[in-house]
């Protein structure tokens, strides 16, 4: 007999992998020609109050070196611009180009459609126990990692 822990682990991994796979397929079908990792870097830049290399790396939980590699590719593909602070040349800021905003619009549409579908099919607003459980799982990962 499979334990509840094994079932929950399998379900979480399965849902996570399905979302990433479906999202990548839909974005590709809608003409997005960058990887999901690159899309998530764009999203982190957009969602940073002060989009410096340091703050974006922290938001993504990666090293500056790892982020630099991704940013170099996104700059070369004309999705991101780098610029330095006039007063402190050590600070490197990031700015999204128009092409990045187009990709993020498609990305946001996917997430909106996915959530709307979940609410329609599962009637999640009626299931307070499920909502609280998902909040607890989310908080656990935020606190733990």
Image (tube, rainbow, N blue to C red):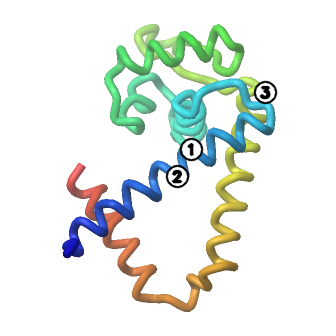
- Relative horizontal placement of residue 65, taking residue 75 as reference (left or right): left
Q: Position of residue 91 (x, y in %)?
A: 44, 16
Tell us which disc is closer to us: 2 or 3.
2
Q: Name the residue under label 2.
A: 18
Image position of 89 with respect to 123: above or below: above
Which numbered disc, 3 or 1, marks the residue that appears first in the sequence? 1
Crowding around mark 3 (Cα neighbors within 10 Å: few <14, some 14 to 19, many 20+) is few
Task: Tell me the distance, in whole angstroms, between the alpha carbons under discs 2 and 3.
Answer: 29 Å
Tell us which disc is closer to us: 3 or 1.
1
Q: Position of residue 95 (x, y in %)?
A: 63, 24
The reply to whether the C-beta atoms of the residues labelled 2 and 3 are less than 8 Å apart is: no
The secondary element bearing badge 1 is classed as: helix
Q: For this rendering, which residue is in front, 17 or 65?
A: 17
The reply to whether the C-beta atoms of the residues labelled 3 and 1 are less than 8 Å apart is: no
Crowding around mark 2 (Cα neighbors within 10 Å: few <14, some 14 to 19, many 20+) is few
Which picture quadrant has residue 101? top right
Q: For this rendering, which residue is in front, 111 or 82?
A: 111
Image position of 119 with respect to 17: above or below: below
The secondary element bearing badge 2 is classed as: helix
Task: Tell me the distance, in whole angstroms, between the alpha carbons under discs 3 and 1.
Answer: 25 Å
Q: Name the residue under label 3.
A: 98
Q: For this rendering, which residue is in front, 104 or 116?
A: 116
- Relative horizontal placement of residue 94, taking residue 7 as reference (left or right): right
Task: Tell me the distance, in whole angstroms, between the alpha carbons under discs 1 and 2.
Answer: 5 Å
Crowding around mark 1 (Cα neighbors within 10 Å: few <14, some 14 to 19, many 20+) is few
Q: Mark 1 points at which residue?
A: 21
Which picture quadrant has residue 30? top right
């Amino acid at each position: 007999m499979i334990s509840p822990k094994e079932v929950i682990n399998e379900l979480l991994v399965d849902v996570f992998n399905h979302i990433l796979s479906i999202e990548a397929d839909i974005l590709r079908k809608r003409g997005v020609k960058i990887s999901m990792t690159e899309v998530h870097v764009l999203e982190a830049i957009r969602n940073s109050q002060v989009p410096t290399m340091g703050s974006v790396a922290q938001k993504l939980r990666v090293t500056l070196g790892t982020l630099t590699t991704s940013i170099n590719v996104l700059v070369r593909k004309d999705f991101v611009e780098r610029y330095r602070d006039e007063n402190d040349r050590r600070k490197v800021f990031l700015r999204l180009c128009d092409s990045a905003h187009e990709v993020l619009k498609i990305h946001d549409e996917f997430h909106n459609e996915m959530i709307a579908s979940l609410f329609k099919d599962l009637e999640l607003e009626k299931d307070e126990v499920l909502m609280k459980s998902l909040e607890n799982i989310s908080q656990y990962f935020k606190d733990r990692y």
